Image: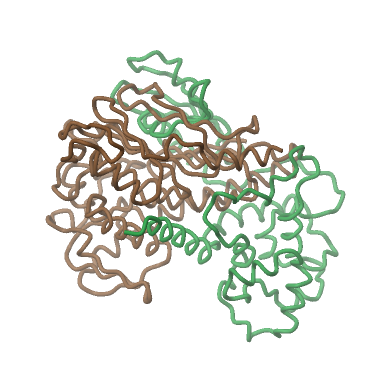
Amino acid sequence: MGSNRLMAIGSAAVIGVYAAGFFKTKAAADRFAADSNVRRPPPPSEPVASADRTVERVTPPAADPRGTRIGAGATAALPPMPALVRADDHVPGKPVSSPAAAEPATIQATVANALPSITVAAADSVPVVAPVVTSPEVVTPPPTPPAPVQVAAPQPIATKRAEPDPPVRVQAAPWKDGTYYGWGKSRHGDIQAVVVIHGGRITNALVAQCLTQYSCSWIAALPPQVVGRQSAEVDYVSGATQSVNAFYYAIVEALSHAK
Amino acid sequence: MIRTVPMMGTVVSIQIVGHGSSDAARIERESAIDRALEWFSQVEACCTRFDDQSELRRLCVRVGEPVVVSDMLFAPLHFALTVAAESGGAFDPTVGGPMEARGFDANHRTGTLSRSAGAAASGASFRDVVVDPAERSVTILRPLTLDLGAVAKGLAMDLAARELQPFGNFAIDAGGDLYLGGTNAAAEAWTAGIRHPREERAVIETIRLSNVAVCTSGDYERAGVATDSGHHILDPRANVVSGAGGSSVIGASGQAVPSATAVASATVIAPSAMVADALATAAFVLGPVAGLTFLEQNGVRGVMFTSTLQRLATKDFNMKHPELDDAAVRRT
């Protein structure tokens, strides 16, 4: 059997799902966008909101000392993947809209203007350009960018206006704020976890009680990183399933109280 | 920034290294982690065998007719069936029925029991599932229960990794299956420990990695959840708990291996977590000798430890890791 066949099929599968379904993560993006909208008014005169995506993707944050993290070099060892598919699929409600529905010339111009450095990649990797196509009201600079496009863009980053950054707010989530406890069982004994929900999000998860046959010190080091930094020597441990199971069940139970 | 949530029957932890300290950068990271975790939710909702409303379970009840399924189900199923064929059935996504029969039918998340129509079926194999890539359809030829567990989690990790790719330096830990992107906070390749298969808190070996996934299948995983006798990896070929495969005396790398030695854990490094996870499971089931050969045939790096802690590694496992060069280049 070809030595890279499974690898190729695997890579293709991941690319396929990602390309076909970025809108699947729309729910998370929606929550974020809704939150962004509440947080600040949309920029009044940004010509095409999708341009923000480009800016966001190709411009490393100036404050970042390493500077080159976004984009360059990051995908070196990964199988080749269409890097910018999601910019297209991100527009909700138009996953497969037909190019014929709009004016092709206008579309191309819009795309070219809005996405100067990614147009080629996007065109190569995405069979249908249409999802990126903004409806006519977007081509005409609107006073308010259409909401769907904001969904795609982490807007506050992309916006180049010199507004002060708002306080970090988090998405609406299914959990109520508070502190919750839960028990998890393992072969070696039970663990009680405490989970702190703030702003609808887990901000901390700790072992409250550790009734295992081992010393608790080792597991106390698990949260909040849980499995990261389990020892001083390593960043992560592969195969550490059992180590986290009891803690997992404890968190699940704690979160069940937070609904 | 690290976020940890319970997901897909385990704890998923996502870390993004550095990337600016402004509020804007923080919001960007939060948003990206939201999207990455959303992939886990979507894959789990589609591919879990613990929810009779999942697309996977709804597919399983339609026997004998082609069913067009979503990409999110078709892609991992197609991949799993391919691995099944290439491993001679050592890895088999139709193992769901026997797994249920042995008691692995509790939803790890809710604890509720979940029995499916195919649970009673025996003798089903991956050959009873026919896929048509052109039509994106699946035909199940006889009652069976599909289990995409390892492949689905790997797929979710790969999708999440894609989502986080713009940040360059990040880590995804899904219950001990890892994807390590770029470098750690010290701007060095990530250090991953391989869990000692017999000592819960110990690391048996450490490796330096960048931009790859590393997954480990061990006989200690979820042991005790169901019966006392079995860990959760079945040998689909015999419907017995696996790990005693391999009839040769000399391994693929020339290492002598007692023929009846069981694999305690198999670790695979690959660019894709889905590939690494599936191949680690297959190698574990195949046993020390055949498993190692299988990994080498498929061009992945791997290391296995037997129940007597004998170490078997693919030929290139200890070679200079190419991804380390990538990390070094990024630093300069």
- Residue at coordinates 39% horizontally, 58% vertically from top-left? B46
Residue A32 vs residue B126, the one in the foreground:
B126
Instruction: Measuring from the top left, give residue B14's x and y in whole percent.
Output: 54, 40
Image position of A163 (left or right of A96): right
Name, please, the residue furthest toward the top: A215
- Residue at coordinates 82% horizontally, 64% vertically from top-left? A46
Instruction: Measuring from the top left, give residue A222's x and y in whole percent.
Output: 48, 25
Instruction: Measuring from the top left, give residue B324's x and y in whole percent.
Output: 57, 38
Q: Quadrant of the N terminus of chain A?
A: bottom left
Picture layout, residue B260 above or below residue B157? above
In the figure, the shade used to draw chain B is brown
Q: How many marks?
A: 0
Residue B96 vs residue B325, the one in the foreground:
B325
Instruction: Measuring from the top left, give residue B85's x and y in whole percent.
Output: 26, 59
Q: Colour mode?
A: by chain
Picture layout, residue B240 above or below residue A219? below
Residue A125 vs residue A195, the one in the foreground:
A125
- Residue at coordinates 28% horizontally, 53% vertically from top-left? B147
Image position of B230 (left or right of A25): left
Give the image quarter of residue A6.
bottom left
